[in-house]
Amino acid sequence: MALDHIVDGLVRRGLKPLRVGLDAKVQPALKDYVLEAYLNRHPRRGNLERLVREETRLQEKVRVLERNIEEAKSRDQPNRLASLHRIMGNVDRQLRVVKARLFKLRQEMITDVLKQVDVVGSLDLRFHRR
């Protein structure tokens, strides 16, 4: 609560604060100053959402392949099993690439947010001004 009072005072003074902490504990009037709010307004948000959808699609593909592999094992289908393992290897590689891109993009977006704010405050009540 004290952090929210400080953030509110910074906003009233014309500064752009970033409130770091549990979003659920933020006063509704200050929701625009948490990291997720800044990221939601980021120009590259659409790219992030596309990568998240791709990650979800690939994760589902992995689950289906895992079920098919178990089925091929139980039916003693070695040729099918070998083929499914090759496909799984390709999907795993694709998933690692997407996860790496997601991480990189999110870090770049966070860096952009940190460059545009004036003050960063966290729950330990320490504020750092650039």
Image: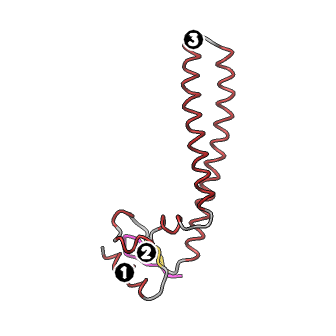
The CA distance from mark 2 to mark 3 is: 59 Å
Mark 2 or 3, nearer chain start: 3
Of the numbered discs 3 and 1, the one sitting upstream in the chain is 1
> Can you tell which quarter of the image residue 5 is in?
bottom left
Q: Tag 2's secondary structure?
A: strand
Residue 75, labelled with which disc? 3
Q: Amino acid at mark 1?
A: Ile
The structure residue drawn at horizontal position 48% and vertical position 64%, both measured from the top left corner, is 36
Query: Real-space Cα distance between discs 3 and 1?
Result: 65 Å
Q: Please tell me whether mark 1 sits on a helix, a strand or a loop.
A: helix
Residue type, numbered disc 2: Gly
Percent coordinates x, y for residue 74 in the rendering: 54, 13
Using the numbered discs, state the Cα–Cα distance from disc 1 to disc 2 in whole angstroms: 9 Å
- Which residue is under mark 1? 6
Task: Give the crowd class for mark 3: few <14, some 14-19, many >=20 residues within 10 Å.
Answer: few
The residue depicted at 53 percent of the width and 65 percent of the height is: 39
Location of residue 83 in the rendering, given as x and y in whole percent from the top left corner: 69, 22
The answer to whether mark 1 and mark 2 are in CB contact below 8 A is yes
Q: Which residues are magenta?
A: 122-130
